[in-house]
Image (spheres, rainbow, N blue to C red):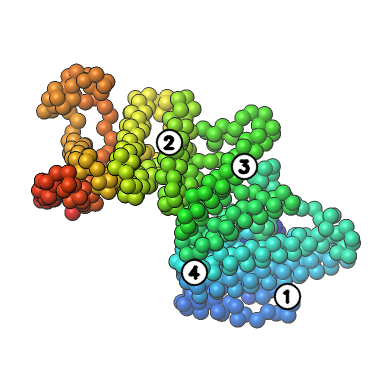
Amino acid sequence: GGGGGGGGGGGSHNFSRQSSKDSSASVAAEDDPFSSLPRLEPDGSQPLFSQADAVLRSDRWGDGPTFRPLDVEYVLFDLMKNCCKAGTVRGMEYAEELLRRMTEEKRAVNDELLRLNRDEEGRGGKPKYEPFVLSELPFRVVMFGWAQLARKGILSGPERIRRILRTMETEDEWDRKNRGLFQGLDADDPDFDDLIMDEGAGGADGGGKVRSCRPTVASYNTLLTAYAHAASRDSLAGKHAEELLDEMDKLHAEKGWHTRPNTRSYTLAITVHSKTPSVWVGERADRVLTKMEEAQRKGAERYREKVGEPYDFSRPENNAWRIVTVDATALSSVIDAHVRSNARGSSDRAERLLLDMADVHRTEGGGRVDLKPDARAFASVMRAHARAAGRMGNPKARFERCERAEALLELMIEMSRAEAEAEEARAHDAAAEVEGGGGVERLVPTASAYNAVLSAWSKSDTRESAPRAEALLRRMIDDALLDSVPDDGAGATEEDGADDGDGHGDGDGVDRRVKIPVPRPNVRSFNAVITAWARFGRYDPSSAHKAEEVLDLMYELHRSGRWGA
């Protein structure tokens, strides 16, 4: 929500204080023209909202400030942040009122500082004070609070954030004109706006910070987060998110603001679509992905032009700056959108995206670690195949869907084993271990992935459905049992692990492949297989007995105490 109390404002005033952690730190009287003002010290023994009420009821002293600037910057900020943490509409309304009070105090402080500077100039001296400026952070904290309430179903959250963004623009424009006055410019001069020196405007390609409350890409990403939280209840959230991306691009192009959408911006917009209840969300997510790919292409061209070498997508930390990058998070969100859309061909499109990610990630010598699909993406596509199988009338087509789902599971296991083998190799190579390769979560098959395939077979209603489902369940049980036994080769037989030409054994009866974590079957796993046998009666008269055998196996494993609840 916004760090500690020490980040309330980014003011460039030349006040000093003893400690950045002590919001009530004393300021030397000769440096602080506001030392006569009372300190802002909320009564911690009172309820939070009572403290806020007391501050908001504090009378303004004429046109001057009520509180010391440092108290506005830190103490008032802390109180506002705590109101946001309350997680209620009432708390957010108090936070907005406190934010409004912060901007009022800021303006009053600057009016007084400007008057003091002019008095000093009138006596032949030099101006002593610089403008007092609030940073973007207090505004973002309040926006973040409203975004969290959108998750709880408060649909007004995005609009309240919009209102705060407009306030940020207004205050930034006021700060800029105020800076011109502190620079000695005449506000009546027709060229006043052009003569203002905009200090601290930031570095190339949007990498710097502005010394103001001007909205940045992070501000707009907070609004996109709110749209994502509200998407399941607001059918227009996706439309608003796409329009916001265009607005951010336009502000960057026309005003030079640091609002150019970044990787997170596009990913959030895709996520908004993926959560919106509509049969068209897959196509809409693809549309945002196309924009993201174009932004990546332009960013790479701009990087090569300015740096003189290509952008390194495999090791982005080695680049001079980051560009928009289509990564696994963005593509997984597109996959989610297609899976949720449930439209014709959606599972095919989701599978193509998943396989493309896996192919690029596994490319020899330059695999993109950031494109590695995770277990959630695999399971999502498998479930899409399961749903498609349940809708199809052709048994052959249903069988094909189940085969494709199980092929994805095998790919997942293969990639997991390859990662485990690579990790084992690095453990025996100190140089490679120092070089890197860590920091990325390993791909591990999950019970959810297995269950998606089991569900596909149980819904397929083909001659192979129940036997294939039970075979997968028993393999899952056997692998889980082997995974819990020390790998010392004890008791292995020739049939258990002899080399049969697939390269997995050494001919000594022991499987030398690196073991990977295997999930234990859960209630859903057994239920899927029992359901498969229950529907298998027209192919096998004994299907009811076989369903009961699976139930007996389930009970037996539970009673053994080795499988938990």
In the foreground, 132 or 411: 411
In the foreground, 16 or 202: 202
Q: Height in image: 56 above or below 196? A: below
The reply to whether callout 1 and callout 2 are in contact (CB within 8 Å) is no
Mark seen at residue 295: 3
Disc 4: CA contacts within 10 A as few (<14), some (14-19) or many (>=20)? some
* Residue at x 72% of width, y 69% of height: 107
The reply to whether callout 3 and callout 2 are in contact (CB within 8 Å) is no
Residue 519 picture location, percent across and down: 25, 43
Residue 95 picture location, percent across and down: 56, 71
Is residue 367 among the parts visible in the rendering? yes
Mark seen at residue 154: 4
Which circle's residue, 4 or 3, is located before the other in the chain? Answer: 4
In the picture of the structure, the residue carrying the numbered disc 1 is 64
Q: Height in image: 252 above or below 67? A: above
Number of dots carrying numbers: 4
Residue 20 picture location, percent across and down: 57, 58
Which circle's residue, 3 or 1, is located before the other in the chain? Answer: 1
Q: Amino acid at mark 2?
A: Leu
Give the Cα distance between marks 3 and 1.
48 Å
Disc 2: CA contacts within 10 A as few (<14), some (14-19) or many (>=20)? some
